[in-house]
Amino acid sequence: MATWSEFAAADPDLAAWGEKRLERERVAYVATLNEDGSPCVNPVHPVICQGRLLLFIAPDLPKARNLRRDGRYAMHSLVHDLSGTGGEFHLNGRATLIADETVRQRAIESACYTPNGQTILFELGVDRAYSTAYEDDHVTRHEWRANGK
């Protein structure tokens, strides 16, 4: 698994493309696993800060409980319209709880909103990233994997 900065160093074009998608709408959907193994999908506001992909989440929400118990996640950028204008960006990996107050403060400063003091902070590691672009009736896909496969 890679950090956002490691992913960006390995595939700068895809990382820049994905970052634009995440910043454009400022909302993405994260899928986590409930205790019974069923999927749980919720909106989030990803923050890219100092080479890290971060999420603030209220500690009592199912997505926070799920990520604490089993860090596996999938995240998908918001799709702008029915035509897929601007394309889609998807990530898979594992989330890690971050307790460092310096990282938290920098993430607050970088966020497009003000997280309340009760939120907890997760860093999303990247195992796989891929994009789908729709242009002139042509679909282009690009994929990156941390393990190179």
Image (cartoon, helix red, strand yellow):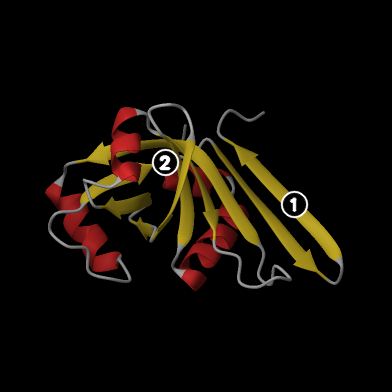
The numbered mark at residue 42 is: none
* Residue 132, percent from left and from top: 70, 56
Q: Secondary structure at mark 2?
A: loop
Give the residue drawn at x 59%, y 48%.
Answer: 11
Q: Nearer the viewer, residue 18 or 90?
A: 90
The image quarter in which residue 3 lies: top left
Give the residue drawn at x 60%, y 55%.
Answer: 89
Residue 1 falls left or right of residue 123:
right
Q: Secondary structure at mark 1?
A: strand
Type of amino acid under label 2:
Thr
* Residue 136, percent from left and from top: 85, 72
Mark 2 — residue?
A: 3
* Residue 17, percent from left and from top: 59, 61
Nearer to us: label 2 or label 1: 1
Type of amino acid under label 1:
Arg
Q: Residue furthest right?
A: 137
* Residue 18, percent from left and from top: 56, 58
Residue 120 falls left or right of residue 136:
left
Quadrant containing the C terminus in the rendered view: top right
Instruction: Give how far apart the Cα atoms at labels 2 and 1 are.
Output: 22 Å
Give the residue drawn at x 23%, y 52%.
Answer: 58
> Which of pointers 2 and 1 lies earlier in the amino acid sequence?
2
Residue 63 falls left or right of residue 142:
left
Mark 1 — residue?
A: 141
Give the residue drawn at x 22%, y 69%.
Answer: 114
C-beta proximity under 8 Å, tags 2 and 1: no
- Local crowd size for mark 1, using a 10 Å CA cut-off: few (<14), some (14–19), many (≥20): few
